Image (tube, grey):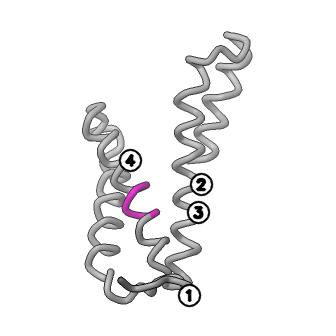
Amino acid sequence: MGFVAVAILVPAIATSGAAIGGLVVPGALLLLAAAYVYAGYALRKERRAGGWAAVAAAGCMATLQLRNGVVSAAGVSLVVNLAILALVLTNWRHLRRAAGAVDA
């Protein structure tokens, strides 16, 4: 996803001189890519924050794919994002809170 963002960003800068409108989509994709990276790292460490990041990133991407009608073009990606959501939510009880978390 990060490479796709860069592939969109470079022509946008070259043609429009880095106009704000040309930076929105690549910027959002870079943020989602960073969320996926953090989610993978934190889930490997069994942290609940990684679960939240995975749910947010995969949910956002699945919603964007469904809303924009790219289901036929990116069907595999949609299935993968929905599988990430299902697996993280199913295994939520195995994730630990942060070390300094205070229970109320």
Residue at the image point whose x is 52% and y is 49% from the top: 32
Density class for disc 3 (Cα within 10 Å; few <14, some 14-19, many ≥20) is some
Task: Report the residue marked by disc 1.
Answer: 99
Magenta span: helix, strand or loop, mainly? helix
Identity of the amino acid at label 2?
A: Ala
Residue 34 — which label?
Answer: 2
Identity of the amino acid at label 4?
A: Met
Q: Which of marks 4 and 1 is in front?
A: 1
- In this rendering, the answer to whether 91 lies above or below 50 is below
Q: Which badge, 4 or 3, is on the more N-terminal residue?
A: 3
Residue 61 — which label?
Answer: 4
Density class for disc 4 (Cα within 10 Å; few <14, some 14-19, many ≥20) is some
Callouts 2 and 3 close, C-beta under 8 Å: yes
Residue 95 located left or right of residue 99 = left
Callouts 2 and 1 close, C-beta under 8 Å: no
User: Which residue lies most toward the top here?
Assistant: 16
Asked if the stretch drawn in magenta spans residue 54, the answer is yes
Residue at the image point whose x is 37% and y is 89% from the top: 94
Quadrant showing the C terminus: bottom left
Q: Nearer the viewer, residue 17 or 92?
A: 92
Asked if the stretch drawn in magenta spans residue 47, the answer is no
Residue 37 — which label?
Answer: 3
The alpha-carbon separation of the residues under discs 4 and 3 comes to 14 Å
The alpha-carbon separation of the residues under discs 2 and 4 comes to 13 Å
Identity of the amino acid at label 1?
A: Ala
Identity of the amino acid at label 3?
A: Val
